[in-house]
Amino acid sequence: MEKLFGVCVPVCSVFDENEALNEKAYLAHVDAMLEAGVHIILACGGTGEFAYLRTEEKRRLIEITAKHIDGKAALVAQTSAISLRDTIEETLHAVDQGVDAVMVLPPYFEGPDAGGVYNHFEQVARISDVPLMLYNIPVHSGFDITPDLFSRLLEIDGIEYIKDSTGDLVRIQELIQTGGKVFNGGDPITYPALAAGCVGCVWGAVNFIPREAVALYELVQDGELKQANDLWQQLLPSQLFVWSHVYNSSVKAAATHRGYTVGECRAPVLPLSGDDLSSLIGALNQIQAA
């Protein structure tokens, strides 16, 4: 199986005016990401508003995404659930669709201790025919996958990757030192995290900067760090904005402003407006055409 690397976009789920999934617009947005050269499509990620999707909707998105991209990029599905049983069922469904990996959170909301988290990942890895990408976002999950725990989890067959969304460059470097494959998930540190040795990034903002994101990754891989930093300075204001505001509504507003059809978030997440929207547009205007 090919190793995962590069720019991974957690694709925005697209809803119509009645908050039903708009599959046609969703797949058109997937196509826009593919045309920009992204390396990995992630279905049902955080930026895909998985927390607001019903089980049947998440499964449907994974199914149509797998069929649509048909090997044009790697495919990861986010299959997290609070209970082990539900996580296993969602993982098996995703594996049946031909995904290249699954991304899994620790059990969240009054979840277990480190021993329970270890067992959770061990059991999911045992039933999966594809690698697991651990998803560390303690501000939302309530549990932190520390470098020490990641080192232990790497001993489990099938666990190879972690997406770390702490936004902490020291943490990223500690995780890299474990020998595991690290994807950065903290938007404002993407460039230094790639330069530090991350194999890629799982980056929600790619929904509105796909070409720029791929260009940044390729410049770092080619050792063209001066050019990479020049590009990064154009992107940084928008990355700082989305990181410090309601994330999904900011990403969707930015994508809409830049010509992508992604609609608005499901309630209760409200659309960006007023001074916030004006500030975001000002940050986006600093990005030169790629």
Image (tube, rainbow, N blue to C red):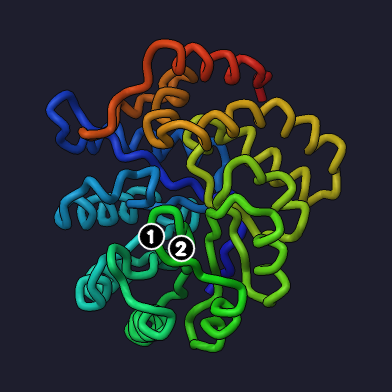
- Residue marked by disc 2: 135
Query: Circles 1 and 2: CB distance less than 8 Å?
Result: yes
Q: Residue at x 76, y 57 (%)?
A: 196
Q: Residue at x 33, y 51 (%)?
A: 44
- Residue marked by disc 1: 141
Side of 40 where 108 appears, left or right? left
Q: Earlier in the sequence, mark 1 or mark 2?
A: 2
Q: Which of the 4 image quadrants contains residue 233?
A: top right
Crowding around mark 1 (Cα neighbors within 10 Å: few <14, some 14 to 19, many 20+) is: some
Q: Secondary structure at mark 2?
A: strand
The answer to whether residue 77 is above or below residue 236 is below
Q: Quadrant of the C terminus?
A: top right
Q: Report whether residue 93 is seen.
A: no
Report the amino acid beneath label 2: Tyr
Side of 13 where 289 appears, left or right? right
In front here: 216 or 73?
216
In front here: 93 or 159?
159
Side of 170 where 9 appears, left or right? left
The answer to whether residue 274 is above or below residue 61 is above
Side of 131 where 241 appears, left or right? right
Report the amino acid beneath label 1: Ser
In front here: 172 or 18?
172
